[in-house]
Image (cartoon, coloured by chain):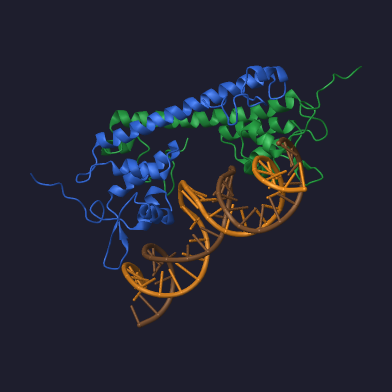
Chain colours: A green, B blue, C orange, D brown
Amino acid sequence: MAMKRIDPEDWGKELTVGEVARRSGVAVSALHFYETRGLIRSHRNRGNQRRYPREVLRRVAVIKVAQRVGVPLASIKAALDSLPDGRSPTAADWARLSRIWRDELDARIGQLQRLRDQLDGCIGCGCLSIKACRLRNPWDELAEHGPGAHLLEP
Amino acid sequence: MAMKRIDPEDWGKELTVGEVARRSGVAVSALHFYETRGLIRSHRNRGNQRRYPREVLRRVAVIKVAQRVGVPLASIKAALDSLPDGRSPTAADWARLSRIWRDELDARIGQLQRLRDQLDGCIGCGCLSIKACRLRNPWDELAEHGPGAHLLEP
DNA sequence: GTAGAACCTCAACTTAAGTTGAGGTCAACG
DNA sequence: CGTTGACCTCAACTTAAGTTGAGGTTCTAC
């Protein structure tokens, strides 16, 4: 089968770090940084400049979304490292990452919602200042079960 | 009117930094740190040791909750600074802070929920890897509206 | 063929929110 | 009165995620 012709000025070209930066909205310094952290890779041209396959744009997009979810770079790296080695990642590969992070996100949303409910309770009952409130609420002044925060933990 | 008698061994006593740490679940070093940042205050006994009024426990509890909401210490300080100067804070004072932070929390939950929905969409459509998906979704490889992240912003 | 933009490395700086350690004082118990 | 534990200050270190700058090279366009 004949391959589709690809314009070498466009799809066929590798990207410079500046191009990746412009197209991904990430600073050049951040791209360098990601590379030191092993989240992305590049090869060098004869003049020692980085050249990226277009795939890097998707990786960077994924990194950015995962960061928005609140995943630290180290974990993002671990996730990206779990992608297949030889072949390019498939839809299913990316979907697996998405699903993991979606679950994390869900957990975080749940935590924050519980916290919000507690805050609502406190606003309603005038707590934070009313002693009676100590009996049933997390803003307790007395750590009744030893040191550490218990009641506020989800 | 006769004041209620208070046992000086208990309610009447000021707290040492260690006691505050134990009762609030916050490390001594963190209490010192909060003090340098102006979030709490103490006075010193003849031996230059910190002594805290019991009120500090509520402040620390508030600080911890606000941190869970995601409020940075600097903003927490600003909020605490807005408490009345002369008198002790009332229920309404604390409730005002709670409400502000509740709203912030709500906003953050909303952001994360929108992000989750996008992630759900991506999982559903197999995006992150399917080119067609670029048309309608934020994982776009092409920053079509110039540098920076646009589509993912809430 | 040269100017200027873009690139390179490496070290140091940044912010947040603390922690850790050194070196020294204070207090409470027996 | 001595020792042990709690406390003091101050400086330096920590982690995350980068940014900034110096000093030097390469690429591109005229």
**Up-down: is B96 above or below B17?**
above
Camera-side residue: B46 or B129? B129
Camera-side residue: A79 or B61? A79
* Whole-percent x, y for residue D13 in the image: 56, 60
Residue C5 left/right relative to B67:
right
Q: Quadrant of residue A128?
A: top left
Location of the N terminus of chain B (image quadrant): top left
Camera-side residue: B95 or D12? D12
Residue at x-position 26% and y-position 67%:
B46
Q: Quadrant of residue B77?
A: top left
Q: Does the image show residue A142?
A: no
Residue B25 left/right relative to A83:
left
Q: Does the image show residue A121?
A: yes
* Whole-percent x, y for residue A68 in the image: 56, 33
Camera-side residue: A145 or A124? A124
Q: What is the number of callouts on the image?
A: 0
* Whole-percent x, y for residue B15 in the image: 30, 55
| Residue, far right | A1
**Up-down: is B103 above or below A1?**
below
* Whole-percent x, y for residue B142 in the image: 66, 26
Residue at x-position 54% and y-position 30%:
A107
**Up-down: is D29 above or below A11?**
below
